[in-house]
Image (cartoon, rainbow, N blue to C red):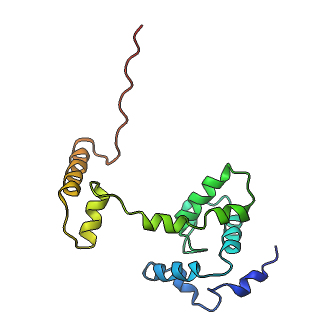
Amino acid sequence: MKRDWELSAACRNQDAELWFSSRTQARAVEICRTCPVLLLCRAAVLKREDGLPRCQRSGIIAGLTGSQRYDLARAAAGATLPPAEIASAAVGVADRIRQEPAPCGTRAAYQRHLRRREPVDEACRAANARSAGRYRRTGSTRRQQPEPAPSAR
């Protein structure tokens, strides 16, 4: 595979450590967003990491974290598109994940308010209390599926 496109990459003259440090992760994503060869990079990384488990994908590559690349590869596994088209279809994956905060009235929104040191509204406070109660009762934060109704014979 010819990789002349790498000469035009925005990350070419940057310190490689930038993409593997949690402190500089946001800066790495910003550099990737402005890259003129982002789609080619994304297609190459999807091909290179094909078959790797989530735990072996690290760092920011093509503007995505290892988990985001794994999820993208899993979603594309059943698709019949070539890697370049899959990469172009996923251009906004990182943006959508970061731009859609949890709505108020959820435990995630409650935690966001605390993290940002914002006042916590009553809906978020109630959602957090429900979640804590569910955890105390069941030992899990996952919602349990309701039992199916018995069929009448």
Residue 47 vs 137, above or below: the answer is below
Residue 10 found in image quarter: bottom right
The residue at the far bottom in this view is: 13
Residue 147 position in % (x across, y down): 36, 28
Kindly indicate the quadrant of the structure image that contains residue 63: bottom right
Query: Where 91 falls versus 130 (above or below)?
Result: below
Pick out the residue farthest to the top. Answer: 153
Residue located 62% across and 81% down the image: 35
Name the foreground residue: 55 vs 89.
89
In the rendered image, the quadrant that contains the C terminus is top left
In-front residue for pair 144/86: 86
99 with respect to 38 (left or right): left
Give the percent coordinates (x, y) of residue 3: 78, 79
Q: Is residue 40 above or below residue 103?
A: below
| Residue 22 rendering spot, x and y as whole percentages | 44, 78
Query: In the image shown, does 113 or 65 lie closer to the viewer?
Result: 113
Q: Is residue 152 left or right of residue 107?
A: right
The mark total stands at 0
Quadrant of the frame with the N terminus: bottom right
Foreground pick, 92 / 8: 92
Residue in the picture at 27% in, 63% down: 111
Is residue 66 in sight in this rendering?
yes
Would you say residue 53 is visible in this rendering? no
Residue for point 65% across, 76% down:
38
Q: Residue at x 53, y 69 (%)?
A: 65
Relative height, residue 94 to residue 8 (above, below): above
